[in-house]
Amino acid sequence: MKRYLIPMGICALLSYTSCKQKEEQKEENVKLLVTSPIEMDTTIVKEYVGQVRSIRHIELRAQERGYLQNVYVDEGQFVHKGQPLFQIMPNIYQAEAQKAAAEVNFANIEYQNTKRLADSNVVAPNELAMAKAKLARAKADLALNNVHLQFTKINAPFDGIIDKFAARPGSLLDEGDLLSTLADNSQMWVYFNVPEAEYLDYKAKAETGKPTVSLLMANQQVFDHPGVVETVEADFDNETGNIPFRATFPNPKGLLRHGETGNIRMVVPLKNAIIIPQKATFEVLDKRYVYVVDKDNKVRSRQITVGAEMEDLYAVTEGLKPSDKILLEGLKKVKEGDKISYDFEKPESVIHKLKLPTE
């Protein structure tokens, strides 16, 4: 029996070796697709969280003490400059204005009488001067009382939209009590924070003009009108390292309202960027890698640093150079150190099939 065991073992070994060679030969016959990074100028779109503010947004407050007698508008109503909004009960101020007007008449009569006597040298010039000063003081009191009377009616200082009411007719108001707010939404300011490094890049190219930006609204729709970055605030926030920017957007249809949120999209140019397809990368423990094909056609994993992300593409700041060959497809079919057979596709052809932003 033992004389038959050895040949059978040899046959099994030969059969296994033959199958293994066929499998390896089959694997070598499967060609994978390889390309190279491409160095080029392009642009990316960066997003920043923005806060939408009206170009004018003010509080309407009572300027006199009294009962709120009339409200001439409704919440959310569009009002025009000079349109009456609120009326504080004016009775007391009307009576005080009438009293001041009577004092003016009395002082004027007294002045005229004194003037005639002074012209006839009956009274001294000092008495005429005192009568004239008394008349001037009475006129000043009348003007002051008229101002107080005018303050009982609050008119719109500009065209805008009335917000909710803080007081209702019949409410007793003190001087300075809030009535409502008024927003001019003809143009909108959107504030967003920019990191220091990106601020420096912005200032470097600011001489070419004010950059335009777009606004992605909360419903994921882009606002119809582009905005212009017009203002950068004076100081950085030491805690965050950011500085606030302000973009101005026209708002002819009144779609944007004070207090909305959205994302500012700013186009940022990239010079001599190393671009690779996203599908050529894989992730391990929050780090991104590619397979680089060496001179012996073996794949070696290499960590890369992604500086910017585009749709379908990455801009790589560290880890690759244009002369490298990277595995484009079949990343799950290989492991570290595998020798592969491949077809090379020019990076220009690969990029053309993907979504690359244009300037």
Image (cartoon, rainbow, N blue to C red):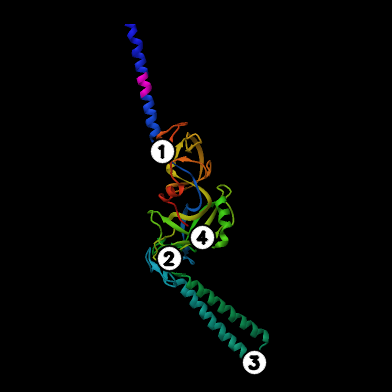
Mark 4 and mark 3 lie on one chain; the one further toward the N terminus is 3
Residue 35, x across and y down, in percent: 45, 43
Q: Give how far apart the Cα atoms at labels 2 and 1 are.
A: 84 Å
Q: Give how far apart the Cα atoms at labels 2 and 3 are.
A: 51 Å
Which residue was labeled with disc 2?
67
Front tag of 4 and 3:
4
Question: Magenta part mainly helix, strand or loop?
Answer: helix
Which residue was labeled with disc 3?
119
Q: Please give the range of residues in magenta.
A: 14-18
Residue 295, x across and y down, in percent: 51, 36
Front tag of 1 and 4:
1
Residue plotted at (65% across, 93% down): 120
- Residue 211 is tagged as 4
Q: Is residue 172 left or right of residue 210?
A: left
In terms of depth relative to the viewer, which is nearer, 16 or 302? 16
Mark 1 and mark 4 lie on one chain; the one further toward the N terminus is 1
Q: Give how far apart the Cα atoms at labels 3 and 1 are.
A: 118 Å
Q: Secondary structure at mark 4?
A: loop
